[in-house]
Image (cartoon, grey):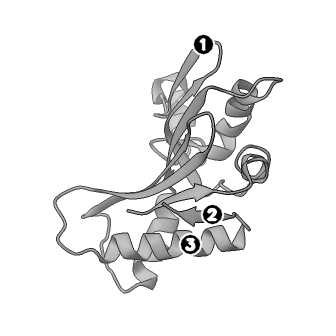
Amino acid sequence: MKAYRISGLKSFMNKLLLTDSFDYFLLEEGTVVTSNAFQIDGHIQKDFYTKEEQEDAACCPYEFAQWKDMRPFCFQLIKGKRTPLSFKFVLLLAPEHMERILAGGGFEDHGNLVKAFTLSVKYDGLRITLVTGLSTNTFLMDKTPEQLWDKAFLKFMERKEILWEEV
């Protein structure tokens, strides 16, 4: 787990909310506090869809909503003349990208041990902090998956030209 304080708040917010920079992620949960507190549960409600849609893998490929689909809603909550008091988004790297990182680092998991690579995006009214994490299905002594995720996330920030300093 690593924490990064973001430099260039406006640039980062544009990348988060207005571009596809974070579209490899799923939204597990979110909270946006403006004049009201808005809670977002990213779990897909499969009962909302018809039986045919549920059987179509392209309709609901994940347990959680894709960030690219939720991004416009989050943007609507955040945009305006006033800055939000705070927000927090818990993002999960899409499983196929997680598996690629694990396999690339020589860690064969087959979905048994590592549940998700997480990224918490927190704004406290002044600054944004990103925190990487690992969700597992069981206690894991081996720190390799966490190290692989931290390394991959640093490369991601470099590619996306996200300015940061380690906390």
Report the side of 138 relative to 43 (left or right). Answer: left
Residue 52: x and y in percent read 55, 34
Disc 3 is placed on an element classified as helix
Disc 2 is placed on an element classified as strand
Per the model, the C-alpha gap separating discs 2 and 1 is 30 Å
- The quadrant the N terminus occupies is bottom left
Residue 8 vs 49, above or below: the answer is below
| Amino acid bearing label 1 | Asn
- What residue do we see at 67% from left, 32% from top? 74
Closer mark to the observer between disc 3 and disc 2: 2
Instruction: Count the numbered circles shown.
Output: 3
Report the side of 137 relative to 2 (left or right). Answer: left
Residue 75: x and y in percent read 73, 33
Q: Nearer the viewer, residue 151 or 83?
A: 83
Label 2 environment density (alpha carbons within 10 Å; few <14, some 14–19, many ≥20): many
Per the model, the C-alpha gap separating discs 1 and 3 is 34 Å
The residue carrying mark 2 is 164
The residue carrying mark 3 is 154
- What residue do we see at 46% from left, 66% from top? 98
- What residue do we see at 81% from left, 24% from top? 80
Residue 108 vs 133, above or below: the answer is below
| Amino acid bearing label 3 | Leu
Q: Farthest residue to the right: give it.
A: 81
Residue 129 in view here: yes
Residue 57 in view here: no
Identify the mark nearer the N-term, 3 or 2. 3
Report the side of 72 relative to 42 (left or right). Answer: right
